[in-house]
Image: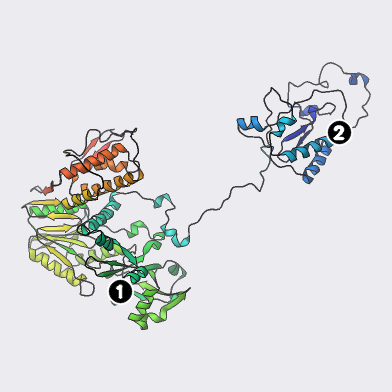
Amino acid sequence: MPSGLKITNRANNVMFDSTWTAGVEYQDDLFDDEDFQDETTSNTPSDDDSDGDEDPYDPMDANELADILQEQNHRDPLPPVLNTTTTDTEDQEQTPTIKQEPESDTEFDVQSIASHVSDRVKEESNRMPNASSFESEYEDSDRDDVSLHADPNLPTSPNLRRTARVRVPNPRYQNLHATMPSQIQEYTTITLYPLAHTIVHLNYACAHMDAKQTLSFLQTYSLKKGLQKFGKKGKDTTYKEMKQLHDRVVFKPIRVDQMTRQERRRAMESLIFLIEKRDGRIKARTCANGSTQRAYISKEEATSPTASTEAILITGAIEAKQECDVITLDIPNAFVQTSVPQIGEKIIMKIRGALVDILCEICPEIYEDHIVQEGNQRVLYVQMLKALYGMMVASILYYKKFRHDIESIGFVINPYDICVANRIVNGSQQTVTWHVDDVKSSHKDPGVNEEFYCWCQKMYGDDDIGQVKVVRGKKHDYLAMMLDYSSNGKLRVDMKYYIDQMIIDFEYKLEGTVTQPWTEKLMRIDKTAKNLDNKRSKVFHTFVMKMMFLSKRGRPDINPAIAFLSSRVKEPNEGDWSKLLRVLNFLKTTRNDILTLEADESQTITWFVDAAFAIHHHMKSQTGA
């Protein structure tokens, strides 16, 4: 079809083509169809050629007609509905079928054509967007529908755009949102230990309580709720806690004009919680909301080293071999006794509400002049002089302090574990290992350990903060492990209480006796098995993590099973559930099996490493040690 005069709407859809109607001239050089032949291009001479007379008819220029129709469209615009570039089925249903009339020798007046087309355009615009009306207007055709395509070079409408607005979390809670993949973490051997340690501690502490006592023990109250529940007892406890911080000079008040804008913006919120102890006493714990420090303190700067489990077990086996005297110590309020370096940017904490009133009651001449009013609350800004629970740098500051203190009395840090230190006293080696504020000391002479305890009491204990707690003898509850030195030359790592509590907490019934924790199908994944429901998936995840904590300490015999099950916590299925039940049944059957470690005279540590090649469904291997 030659590209003669065309009439399009705003969407560039063809509404009328002059080549559909006879008597309209067009230019030969504009033809796109090479196969098209017309009377003007035919070799057969026409009547017009033989006459040689000039046609008196003066056709209207195509641009003039286009301008007229454009003005008409501006007065009565067409809705942009004729863009029929859709799916195949939509094209067949909505695209109008246009029947071309055969060419005729009859001449048409261009003005009448333009008027006719303009009327048709108005009719079509009134009927839009009901595409079914096209079928009644035009005759049916056996040919495929003509697809009307918009010009790809046509600029898009400025009114049609995708919003660029991005949802921003409330700045007050932005530190609690995990908005980046780097902020979302899965369980690792590093994060597992403190979580499992907390679970074990709570299970052990609540073992002999009824439901009401357990709820009271686990329930923590904010200051407002705690004062409402405990009344005068809660207020007295809060007063005692704040007075202890004041007496220990944990912070000092600071004026607003003495802080930079950045220091004020980074100020931590103070938090205080009240809990009821098992004996009925009310305990208050003050801490700082250190989440605001995550924006400018890296994980490497805030992470504190702790003694590895391997170091605890190896030193324990050596102590059993040498028949050393062993004591364990608990340092009270370790963080509060740690000074914050006053170099560079200040660490600021914001105290508000009832705590400000308590501090003014304790010492009005120090705090009263530094109080500012923010909204309807009285606020006190303080500069931190000592570390406080919740500060990201608190644990690493305490580690540096304790390390410096023991180095000052002759201890040398072990190059293989920086939480193990040794010194020679009376010709024999004294070994100290520590995990934050939990310390273990060993020496052949019990008097050396007693001297070390007295030194710790002098450095870290007093009547206001608390006394250093010491445990002597052959059995020690240390880092959720019962270290038993009763057998000569042997260290027994007893975790029966942990297994018992885990079986009690497992709400599903365990039946039968199992002598092996896994079968030859351990590493195989049954893809046809149904996935677990949400409740059992959570139970699966929880108990796999509990058993991982156990396998790294007192029950290494279940390590291969836990290594596999820990890779299935995201989408566990019924087959994985059966494997979990088997391991739990095995632990229940072998509850009395206790890990026993011995050392020989070689003073050599032998490590056995093995690997199974390409045993997983994705052809990965499995290692073990």
* Front in this rendered view, residue 454 or 167: 167
Q: Secondary structure at mark 1?
A: helix
Residue 101: mark: none
Q: Position of residue 475 (x, y in %)?
A: 11, 57
Q: Is residue 26 above or below residue 410?
A: above
Q: Which residue is mark 1?
A: 245
Quadrant where the N terminus lies?
Answer: top right
- Which residue of the protein is positioned furthest toward the left in this rendering? 488
Q: Secondary structure at mark 2?
A: helix
Question: In percent of the image, x 83 and y 35: which residue is there?
Answer: 116
**Disc 1 residue crowd, few under 14, some 14–19, many 20+, Cα 10 Å:** some
Choose top left, top right, bottom left or bottom right for residue 228.
bottom left
Q: Position of residue 583 (x, y in %)?
A: 22, 41
Q: Which residue is mark 2?
A: 110
> What's under tag 1, amino acid-wise?
Leu
* Front in this rendered view, residue 407 or 200: 200
Quadrant where the C terminus lies?
Answer: top left
Q: Position of residue 162 (x, y in %)?
A: 59, 47
Question: In percent of the image, x 19 and y 70: which residue is there?
Answer: 467
